[in-house]
Image (cartoon, rainbow, N blue to C red):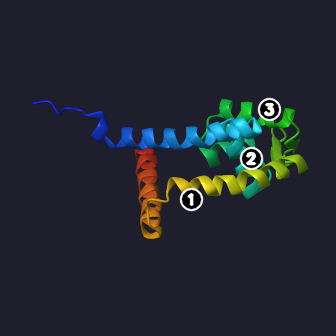
Amino acid sequence: MTATLKLDSFLPYRLSVASNRVSSTIAAAYHAQFGLRIPEWRLTCVLAEFGAMSQQAICGRTHMDKVTVSRAAISLYDRGLVTRTPNPDDQRSHLLDLSADGWTLYRQIAPQALEFERRIFASLSADEQALLRKMLERVETAAANIARTG
């Protein structure tokens, strides 16, 4: 007998639904308040946390594809929120960094992100949140291993 797939109990589907719901909730607020899409606020936060980096490095850090990162970078650059400087390690690319206005925006985004996290996970104890983080790391590692090895 063939196994039956039931989406509501299929963990990859449930994880995707939960992720999409959390992201869209936050994205709606950031779009209404700051005119940012999800890739733009992720790029802003990555640059704030790690400093100047190439678009390729941003792709690796965020797991967003090149086109998505490029569009987000162009949008943020056009708004004066990021700067572009030649990459001394690779003359074919540029390093992106937050401008003064980008830092001002980040200082508005970061507290809201932390408040969203607090509200979304308020029903979980601190121990449960720590366990969830560990479990997500294990899931991400397993998926990366499968992607590498097939």
Q: What residue is shown with label 1?
A: 118
- Label 1 crowd (10 A; few <14 / some 14-19 / many >=20): few
13 relative position to 60: left or right: left
60 relative position to 1: left or right: right
SS of the residue under disc 3: helix
Q: Quadrant of the C terminus?
A: top left
Q: Who comes first in sequence, dot 3 or dot 2? A: 2
Residue occupying image coordinates x 63% and y 57%: 114
Q: What residue is shown with label 3?
A: 74
| Disc nearest the viewer among 1 and 3 | 1
Between 147 and 16, the one lying in front of the other is 16
Residue 126: x %, y % from top left: 47, 69
> Cα distance, mark 3 to mark 2?
12 Å
Q: To which quarter of the image does residue 87 belong? A: top right
**Where is 95 relative to 119, above or below?**
above
Residue occupying image coordinates x 88% and y 47%: 101
> Cα distance, mark 2 to mark 1?
21 Å
Q: Amino acid at mark 2?
A: Thr
Q: Are marks 2 and 1 in contact (CB under 8 Å)?
A: no
Residue occupying image coordinates x 42% and y 46%: 143
Residue 93: x %, y % from top left: 80, 39
Residue found farthest to the bottom? 127
Q: Amino acid at mark 3?
A: Ile
SS of the residue under disc 2: helix
> Cα distance, mark 1 to mark 3?
31 Å
**Which numbered dot is residue 71?**
none
Residue 145: x %, y % from top left: 43, 49
Q: What residue is shown with label 2?
A: 44
Q: Who comes first in sequence, dot 1 or dot 3? A: 3
Q: Quadrant of the N terminus?
A: top left
Q: Are marks 3 and 2 in contact (CB under 8 Å)?
A: no
| Disc nearest the viewer among 3 and 2 | 2
